Image: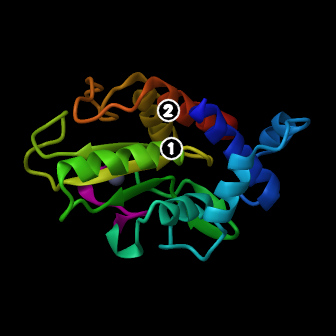
């Protein structure tokens, strides 16, 4: 039930914020739905604010702020770090500003337990997210640890489409597409993220 509430909350947000970053399909889907208290709560908790960091989609920015991610914890939005292989290239424009659905979050100073909690919080807010742990789950031991997340509620490039599909299937979102083991979200959460993506892509 919680997952359905989240879905309705997303729709509620779209109704509340109008056309900003939300597709018409969501408005149509929401027609006739009874008002859910949880959507009011989330609308109040995730107000529209200036971008945490340039290159984020506005909805992704608000939701990251909602779960306590600060600007200084974001290591990449639009960018061309060699390990990213194009995944962080621009996906589109929102409110006249370029964005990518992909965001990297620093993990230095977080325990693995705290990282699992953050992955769960990200999933609840519509992000497909993985902890890139050097030497595990297909992430090279020579690369830096971080969380790679894809905000599912906006248009994105085919490479990120594939990552969201991998997330739903419990895979690592890398070229190897192997099973992800560090922490796998409950299926209902993975389905919610996928359904959000499906409305925007
Ligand atoms: Zn990344």
Please report the residue visible at 27 percent of the width from the left and 62 percent of the height from the top.
Answer: 106
Instruction: State the quadrant of the C terminus.
Output: top right
The residue nearer to you, when weighing 187 against 79, is 187
Instruction: Please say which color scheme the image uses.
Output: rainbow
Q: Secondary structure at mark 2?
A: helix
The residue nearer to you, when weighing 92 against 26, is 26
Residue that label 1 marks: 124
Callout 1 crowding tier (Cα within 10 Å): few <14, some 14–19, many ≥20: many
Residue 175 appears in the figure: yes
Which of the 4 image quadrants contains residue 8? top right
Please report the residue visible at 62 percent of the width from the left and 38 percent of the height from the top.
Answer: 196
Instruction: State the quadrant of the N terminus.
Output: top right
Does label 2 or label 1 sit earlier along the sequence?
A: 1
Residue 91 lies, with reference to residue 28, above or below; the image says below
Real-space Cα separation, disc 2 to disc 1, in angstroms: 7 Å
- Residue 118, percent from left and from top: 35, 51
Q: Which residues are magenta?
A: 74-84
Please report the residue visible at 43 percent of the width from the left and 49 percent of the height from the top.
Answer: 121
Q: Which mark is on residue 71?
A: none
Side (left or right) of 98 relative to 96: left
Residue at the farthest right position? 32
Callout 2 crowding tier (Cα within 10 Å): few <14, some 14–19, many ≥20: many
Which of the 4 image quadrants contains residue 159? top left
Is residue 77 covered in magenta? yes
Please report the residue visible at 22 percent of the width from the left and 47 percent of the height from the top.
Answer: 113
- Residue 7, percent from left and from top: 65, 38
Q: Secondary structure at mark 1?
A: helix
Is residue 48 covered in magenta? no
The residue nearer to you, when weighing 129 against 91, is 129
Q: Are marks 2 and 1 in contact (CB under 8 Å)?
A: yes
Q: Which mark is on residue 189?
A: 2
Which of the 4 image quadrants contains residue 129? top left
């Amino acid at each position: 039930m919680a997952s359905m509430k989240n879905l309705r909350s997303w729709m509620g947000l779209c109704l509340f914020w109008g056309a900003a970053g939300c597709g018409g399909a969501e408005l149509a889907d929401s027609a006739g739905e009874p008002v859910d208290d949880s959507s009011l709560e989330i609308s109040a908790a995730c107000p529209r604010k200036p971008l945490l960091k340039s290159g984020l989609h506005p909805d992704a920015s608000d939701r990251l702020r909602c779960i306590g991610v600060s600007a200084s914890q974001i290591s990449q939005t639009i960018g061309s770090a060699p390990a990213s292989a194009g995944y962080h290239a621009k996906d589109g424009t929102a409110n006249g500003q370029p964005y990518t659905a992909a965001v990297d979050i620093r993990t230095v100073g977080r325990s693995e337990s705290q990282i699992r909690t953050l992955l769960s919080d990200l999933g609840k807010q519509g992000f497909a997210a993985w902890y890139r742990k050097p030497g595990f789950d297909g992430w090279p031991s020579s690369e830096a640890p971080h969380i790679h997340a894809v905000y599912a509620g906006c248009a994105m490039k085919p490479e990120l489409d594939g990552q969201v599909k991998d997330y739903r299937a419990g895979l690592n979102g890398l070229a190897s597409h192997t099973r992800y083991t560090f922490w796998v979200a409950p299926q209902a959460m993975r389905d919610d993220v996928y359904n959000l993506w499906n409305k925007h892509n």
